Amino acid sequence: EPEVTQTPSHQVTQMGQEVILRCVPISNHLYFYWYRQILGQKVEFLVSFYNNEISEKSEIFDDQFSVERPDGSNFTLKIRSTKLEDSAMYFCASSNDGNQPQHFGDGTRLSIL
Amino acid sequence: QKEVEQDPGPLSVPEGAIVSLNCTYSNSAFQYFMWYRQYSRKGPELLMYTYSSGNKEDGRFTAQVDKSSKYISLFIRDSQPSDSATYLCAMSTSNTGNQFYFGTGTSLTVIP
């Protein structure tokens, strides 16, 4: 069964550095998403992306964050000037344009030191 | 307001028991309702997907949606130790491109 893949599984970064989290969505899907889950808290929506542009974003997704689909298969989340509170699991998800829900990857655990 | 409430548990049941998991919500615009299962160190895995009110059954799992009460449920029959996981409810106002709103998740342990 097709799946969403995310790399790396664990990223450790010094505070203030930039990180790029990578995702390969399911190949025939057209909508892409990033969510995060701080330890012990809810899964929170960050951003959705369709037709090479952001379609919706939450208040969490400020100028520190950006997304890109650099080629036909990858979808990336860039976090600039990382802060301690950016430590979380980051999940990528994708869906097609039919009546189907979002399918999630296994996440990248981001640890900011 | 688009808040989703879910009892975090933990919930512990003996093998073979019927499990009932619930979520309530406040936004009447929600139309799509999902249940995800999340094992430790894994991403959410889709279990059930329903639109509007009603019941949907898939094997040992039954999802119920009561929009008039803003209440959704997931029932697991003949629970197995492999069902031990965190169960997340999620909902959205549209099936394309919109964000999902998640509950906090209920931790379930099925004891052999």
Image (spheres, coloured by chain):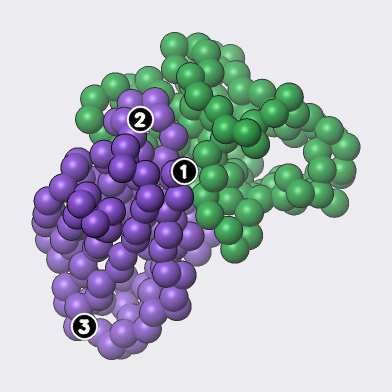
Near mark 3 (Cα within 10 A), the count class, few <14, some 14-19 or many ≥20, is some
Callout 2 environment at 10 Å: few (<14), some (14 to 19), or many (20+)?
many
Give the percent coordinates (x, y) of residue A72. Answer: 47, 14
Q: Reply above or below: A99 against A42.
A: above
Circle 2 marks a residue in which chain?
A
Front disc: 1 or 3: 1
Quarter of the image for residue A20 reads top right
Residue type at numbered disc 1: Gln
When the figure is inspected, residue B36 is found, relative to residue A48, above or below; the finding is below
- Mark 2, mark 1: which one is toward the viewer? 1
Q: Residue at x 39, y 25 (%)?
A: B97
Give the amino acid at mark 2: Ser
Q: Which chain is green?
A: A
Q: Give the alpha-carbon distance from disc 1 to disc 3, as whole Å.
A: 35 Å
Q: Which label number is shown at residue B1?
A: 1
Q: Position of residue B112 (x, y in %)?
A: 30, 87
From the image, tell me which residue sits under label 2.
A95
First-in-chain label (1 vs 3): 1
Q: Are marks 2 and 1 in contact (CB under 8 Å)?
A: no
For the residue pair A4 and B58, the one nearer the viewer reads as B58
SS at circle 3: loop
| Spatial CA span between label 2 and label 1 | 25 Å
Q: Indicate the chain coloured purple by its letter.
A: B
Q: Dot 1: what SS? A: loop
Quarter holding the N terminus of chain A? Answer: top left
Amino acid type at circle 3 is Ala
Instruction: Check contact, mark 1 vs mark 3: CB within 8 A.
Output: no
Q: Nearer the viewer, residue A98 or B20?
A: B20
- Reading the image, the residue beneath label 3 is B17
Residue at image x 53%, y 54%?
Answer: A42
Residue B61 drawn at (x, y percent): 18, 62
Instruction: Characterize the local packing of mark 1: few (<14), some (14-19) or many (20 or more) Cα atoms within 10 angstroms.
Output: few
